[in-house]
Image (spheres, grey):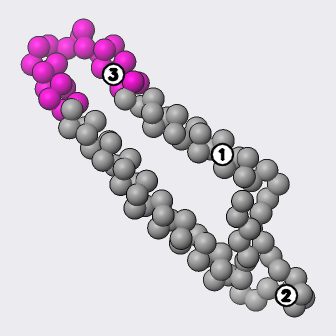
Amino acid sequence: MKITLPKNVTIIQVAPGQAYMAQIQVSIIISIIICLPIVTREIIAFITPALKFNEITSIKKALFPSVILFVIDCIFSYCIVIPFTIEFLYKYGQSIGVVSFLM
C-alpha cells in the first residue's frame, strides 16, 4: 500500500486524550485483577449453602491451585508478555512508517 504524502510530512501515533485514556484503562484492568479473588470468594460463599459436603470439599481443593495459577499468570504477563507486546507494537509502527510519540 502506497501512502501519498509530501516528503517533509511525518505521521505520528498520537490522539487527543490518548495518554489519559490509557491510564484510565490500565487502572480499570488492574482493579478488576485485584478484585477478582474477592468476587470469586463471594460467589463461592453464595453457592456453598446449596451444595453437599463432598461438593464443597472438591471446590475447596480446586480453589487453592486456581489462585496460585492466577498469581503465576499475572507475574508471567507482567514480566514476559507485556514487554514483548510493547516492543512488537513499537516495531509495527516503525515498519509502516509511523513515528511513535511516547509520553
Examine the rendered structure and indicate whether residue 70 appears above or below residue 92: above
What residue is shown at x 20% (from left), y 38% (from top)? 65
Q: The residue under label 1 is which amino acid type?
A: Gln
Question: Would you say 37 lies left or right of 48 here?
Answer: right
What residue is shown at x 35% (from left), y 54% (from top)? 76
Examine the rendered structure and indicate whether residue 95 appears above or below residue 25: below
View extreme (top): residue = 49
State the image quarter where residue 42 is shown: top left
Q: The residue under label 2 is which amino acid type?
A: Thr
Examine the rendered structure and indicate whether residue 45 appears above or below residue 91: above
- Image location of residue 64, percent across then percent down: 21, 32
The boundaries of the magenta stretch are 38-63
Question: Would you say 88 lies left or right of 100 here?
Answer: left
- Image location of residue 91, percent across then percent down: 59, 77
Task: Give the residue pinned by disc 1.
Answer: 23
Is 48 inside the magenta-drawn segment? Answer: yes
Residue depth check, mark 3 versus mark 1: number of the one nearer the observer: 1
